[in-house]
Image (cartoon, rainbow, N blue to C red):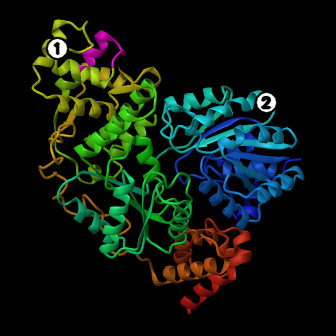
């Protein structure tokens, strides 16, 4: 008989209630149904398969792409007294045999494996000998050929419904556009699965994207100095850049370590643990670091180089502010980054179709870089979500709008062209048609040709116009249809009188120029604006009055850190910063008042309540 999920949530994890949608997902899976869960980073996806695994009879088999991610979740479960283990290649044979014995004895609530281990014939045989509560597929965008972290071995998970038709499957991910969602469902044979989707919006995260200039290195230093003592990640495009950047930041006085695939496993592990435990403030890393990493107090993300796709950028920036408190991101891009990214795609081993997809995803990233409207709105539109507000008030464009010009003629030309020739061409074909006589597009009328000839624009400018149309929702890339572009309802509206604004700044990102955006940005000289929380945010990099909180909050943090050191666990396993912040504001005086703090359940009160109440009492006195 299944356990009560709320009882498990409270007794095992110390929470009194589920987050929005979590409870619905948990009950749906406990009842034996399949689910695809789309939640932003920090939204609580893992709890959607952890709780049902404990509640249902048998063991939850969780497929996870990285051993480091497994270990992070195992540490969390062990801390909360949940019986969980993993089987992976880093374990000794004796340790693996011990886990198998516990598995066969029915002693485990969750077992973590990689997709490669799952495909192993011996492991498949083992599955036939145990009771299985559910199959959980973490980072399920890896299943899809359109996903930005595609893993071929994930495709074998499509056999789950054939071999175990009565076992529920729950797939979770934080980043999936509509095409990727459809491909996940198809690949996992989950056509009848219910799709649960919360908003991808992370309103507590501030976004700033800037063209590189001679001032960029100093801007990064200023950005990091304003957050000294706080935790953050600097993502770089390659291993050499990681090493150089880490050394540069050390020379500037920051506590910094490097992380990339070229390091030994031991060095990577040591550096990751030092960052996770708060021994260093900044980790400089390639994308080899981060998927699913559960560090709640990351306050900033910096991308000195252009990310490979909008999904990658959104997942990486989403590692900040998981505790719900304010976090800042800063991203730079230039022509060299774009050329490097395109070369990486061209030289990659992917099929022609996958390379088309990668080019389209890179263009989507550039579209958000070049957009003239709210960046948050453009990002959410890419993920199939409508952002109702006209301004998010928490991205650089909304804080200080860019200069624009009327681009309706350019938009009409592209829309009319696609209406006439159909959605059988990609962005390269359209730019080629606009600028040359050798395009694949041969059937357009003379009126269409005249419209393009009347517009004085070069190839890189047309590329930018199309990207801005994509980010504004006038056009759509059909990833499942060779990356071809089609016109949306908003695009058709341009033909009926709707205006379209283009970025007035000359950002030449596809030429061989040495730098991008040499003309000063209209945003760079904008005055700083106070936020509601009292912080001051400049138009480019946000500089706060102080990275510290009240004296009581700092005392509560010190006590939390002391407890974590004594127990040898990550500090946010003890309690999150957001709960400490609420504690410092509400100043509970006893257990009944303390349990009213969000994130503080009875289990945490029993273990840590007296220590925190003593700190509050000292300050009250």
167 vs 96, nearest the viewer: 96
**Residue 541's quadrant in the figure?**
bottom left
Residue 389 seen from this side = yes
Image vertical order of residue 560 relative to residue 329, above or below: below
Q: Mostly what secondary structure, the magenta segment?
A: helix
Which residues fall within the magenta stretch? 414-425
Residue name at image x 11 percent, y 23 percent: 455
Rendered location of residue 132, percent (x, y): 82, 42
Which quadrant holds the C terminus? bottom right
Q: Secondary structure at mark 1?
A: loop
Q: Residues within 10 Å of mark 1 (few under 14, many from 20)?
A: few
Rendered location of residue 307, percent (x, y): 37, 46
324 vs 506, nearest the viewer: 506
Rendered location of residue 172, percent (x, y): 61, 42
Residue bearing mark 1: 437
Residue 495 falls within the magenta-colored stretch: no
Q: Residues within 10 Å of mark 2 (few under 14, many from 20)?
A: few
Residue name at image x 11 percent, y 18 percent: 453
Residue bearing mark 2: 163
Residue 326 seen from this side = no
């Amino acid at each position: 008989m299944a356990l009560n999920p709320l009882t498990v949530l409270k007794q095992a994890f110390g929470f009194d209630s589920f987050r929005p949608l979590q409870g619905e997902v948990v009950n749906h899976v406990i009842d034996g149904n399949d689910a695809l869960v789309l939640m932003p980073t920090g939204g609580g996806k893992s709890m959607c398969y952890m709780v049902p695994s404990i509640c249902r009879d048998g063991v939850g088999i969780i497929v996870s792409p990285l051993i480091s991610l497994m270990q992070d979740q195992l540490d969390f479960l062990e801390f909360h007294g949940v019986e969980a283990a993993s089987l992976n290649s880093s374990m000794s044979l004796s340790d693996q045999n011990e886990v198998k014995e516990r598995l066969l004895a029915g002693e485990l609530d969750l077992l973590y494996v990689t997709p490669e281990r799952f495909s192993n014939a011996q492991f498949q045989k083992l599955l036939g000998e145990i009771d299985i509560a559910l199959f959980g597929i973490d980072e399920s965008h890896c299943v899809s050929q359109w996903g930005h972290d595609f893993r071929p071995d994930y495709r074998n998970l499509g056999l789950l419904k054939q071999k175990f038709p009565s076992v529920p499957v729950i797939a979770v991910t934080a980043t999936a556009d509509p095409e990727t969602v459809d491909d996940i469902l198809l690949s996992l044979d989950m056509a009848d699965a219910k799709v649960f989707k919360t908003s991808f919006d992370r309103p507590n995260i501030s976004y700033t994207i800037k063209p590189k200039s001679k001032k960029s290195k100093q801007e990064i230093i200023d950005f990091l100095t304003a957050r000294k003592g706080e935790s953050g990640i600097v993502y770089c495009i390659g291993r050499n850049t990681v090493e150089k950047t880490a050394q540069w930041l050390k020379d500037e006085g920051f506590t910094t370590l490097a992380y990339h695939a070229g390091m030994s496993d031991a060095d990577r592990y040591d550096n990751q643990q030092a960052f996770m435990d708060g021994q260093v403030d900044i980790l400089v890393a390639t994308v080899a670091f981060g998927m699913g990493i559960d560090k709640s107090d990351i306050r900033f993300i910096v991308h000195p180089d252009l990310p490979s796709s909008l999904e990658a950028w959104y997942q990486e920036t989403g590692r900040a502010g998981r505790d719900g408190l304010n976090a800042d991101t800063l991203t730079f891009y230039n022509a060299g980054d774009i050329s490097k990214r395109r070369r990486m795609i061209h030289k990659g081993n992917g099929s022609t179709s996958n390379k088309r997809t990668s080019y389209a995803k890179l263009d989507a990233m550039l579209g958000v870089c070049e957009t003239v409207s709210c960046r948050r709105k453009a990002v959410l539109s890419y993920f199939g979500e409508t952002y109702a507000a006209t301004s998010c008030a928490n991205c650089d464009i909304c804080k200080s709008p860019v200069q624009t010009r009327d681009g309706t003629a350019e938009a009409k030309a592209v829309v009319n062209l696609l209406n006439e020739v159909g959605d059988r061409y990609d962005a390269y074909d359209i730019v080629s048609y606009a600028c040359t006589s050798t395009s694949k597009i041969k059937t357009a009328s003379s009126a269409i040709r005249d419209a393009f000839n009347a517009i004085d624009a070069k190839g890189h400018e047309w590329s930018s116009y199309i990207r801005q149309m994509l980010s504004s929702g006038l056009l759509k890339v059909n990833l499942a249809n060779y990356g071809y572009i089609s016109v949306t309802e908003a695009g058709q509206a341009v033909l009926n009188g709707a205006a379209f604004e283009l970025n007035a700044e000359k950002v030449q990102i596809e030429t061989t120029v040495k730098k991008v955006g040499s003309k000063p940005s209209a945003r760079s000289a904008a005055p700083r604006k106070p936020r509601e929380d009292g912080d001051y945010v400049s138009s480019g990099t946000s500089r706060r009055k102080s990275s510290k909180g009240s004296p009581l909050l700092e005392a509560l943090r010190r006590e939390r850190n002391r407890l974590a050191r004594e127990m040898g666990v990550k500090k946010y396993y003890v309690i999150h910063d957001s709960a400490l912040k609420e504690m410092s504001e509400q100043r509970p005086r006893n257990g009944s008042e303390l349990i009213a703090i969000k994130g503080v359940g009875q289990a945490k009160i029993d273990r840590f309540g007296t220590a925190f109440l003593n700190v509050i009492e000292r300050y009250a006195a």
